[in-house]
């Protein structure tokens, strides 16, 4: 069945090439724009058939020929065709997909379509993250944040991109923990300005505290806790607050067993996600630099 789709796609591609090239007689009476318009529809049909046949490279090529036609027609779909080409080739070649997304982003930015540009820069960041290329993901998420900020319409998306920067930057060996703390605190403070988002602030303050401890700064963590309480008094009754207080005690006393017990007990009530497990293990490793700690192991 897939082969039938591919054959149909090949047929549409040949017809598209023929339509774009035209004939001696046809070129006399038909304009370049008319030829491009006819070829465009044929290339789009070819791309659809190739996708049905799972021939992603050919689908990508068909969409790139659509771009050639659109540049003649100037119908404003060039960026969209770059995106379709990127989506198709992403099934087999992530690197080429990213290159096509970048071309689409450049095109959207030149057309002042920043909403689209920011959305697909985020897509690039997610690809890098899925490939565990965290340093590239951090860069792309920051660029996405800048685009969302320039667009000025989607503050929540801007905040989400910055939070991704903070989280992923801590996964790098050279990650800037202080910069990540500042992001968590800044957005947490902004959340406190709105009743709808205020309940989410304590999670960001909690993450900041873990990074203070990861940065071997239990004193700074304690000072930060007091500052967070001034902004959000309800934080004092949260399990996260009590957990951090006990972690500070364990770290200050270099009590690895106490640290492990606190993590184990907290995890039974509020499951720790991968990011928090990673940070907690780094803190624990700092308490016992000689002993190897297994991922997620607190016993």
Image (cartoon, helix red, strand yellow):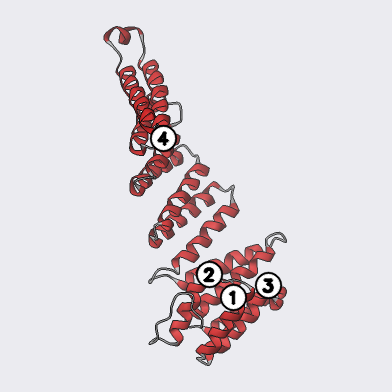
In this figure, which residue is indicated by the disc labeled 4? 51
Q: Is residue 171 above or below residue 129?
A: below
The answer to whether marks 4 and 2 mark residues whose Cβ atoms lie closer than 8 Å is no
Q: Nearer the viewer, residue 184 or 52?
A: 52
* Residue depicted at x 47% and y 82%: 284
* Residue depicted at x 34% and y 49%: 95
| Residue 251 image offset from top left, x and y in percent | 52, 87
Q: Quadrant of the N terminus?
A: top left
* Residue depicted at x 69% and y 65%: 199
Q: Residues within 10 Å of mark 1 (few under 14, many from 20)?
A: some
Residue 110 quadrant? top left
In this figure, which residue is indicated by the disc labeled 3? 231
Q: Is residue 122 above or below residue 32?
A: below
Label 4: element kind: helix
Residue 173 quadrant? bottom left
Q: Is residue 138 above or below residue 67?
A: below
On residue 182, which mark appears?
Answer: 2
The answer to whether marks 3 and 4 mark residues whose Cβ atoms lie closer than 8 Å is no
| Residue 45 image offset from top left, x and y in percent | 42, 26
Spatial distance from mark 3 to mark 1, Cα to Cα? 26 Å
Side of 155 where 146 appears, left or right: left
In this figure, which residue is indicated by the disc labeled 1? 267
């Amino acid at each position: 069945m897939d082969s039938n789709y591919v054959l149909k796609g090949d047929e549409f591609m040949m017809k598209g090439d023929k339509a774009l090239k035209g004939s001696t007689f046809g070129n006399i009476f038909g304009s370049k724009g008319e030829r491009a318009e006819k070829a465009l529809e044929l290339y789009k049909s070819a791309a659809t058939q190739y996708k049905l046949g799972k021939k992603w490279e050919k689908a990508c090529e068909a969409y790139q020929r659509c771009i050639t036609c659109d540049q003649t027609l100037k119908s404003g779909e060039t960026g969209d065709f770059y995106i379709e080409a990127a989506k198709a080739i992403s099934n087999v070649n992530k690197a080429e997909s990213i290159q096509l997304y970048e071309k689409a982003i450049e095109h959207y930015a030149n057309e002042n379509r920043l909403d689209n540009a920011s959305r697909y820069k985020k897509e690039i960041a997610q690809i890098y993250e899925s490939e565990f290329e965290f340093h590239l993901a951090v860069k792309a998420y920051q660029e996405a944040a800048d685009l969302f900020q320039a667009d000025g319409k989607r503050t929540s998306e801007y905040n989400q991109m910055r939070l991704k920067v903070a989280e992923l930057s801590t996964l790098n060996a050279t990650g800037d923990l202080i910069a990540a703390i500042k992001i968590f605190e800044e957005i947490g403070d902004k959340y406190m300005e709105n009743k709808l988002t205020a309940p989410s602030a304590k999670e960001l303050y909690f993450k900041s505290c873990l990074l203070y401890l990861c940065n071997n700064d239990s004193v700074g963590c304690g000072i930060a806790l007091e500052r967070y309480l001034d902004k959000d008094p309800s934080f004092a009754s949260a399990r996260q607050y009590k957990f951090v207080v006990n972690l500070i005690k364990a770290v200050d006393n270099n009590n690895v067993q106490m640290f492990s017990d606190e993590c184990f007990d907290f995890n039974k009530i509020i499951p720790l996600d991968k990011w928090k497990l990673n940070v907690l293990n780094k803190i624990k490793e700092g308490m016992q630099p000689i002993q190897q700690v297994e991922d997620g192991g607190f016993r």
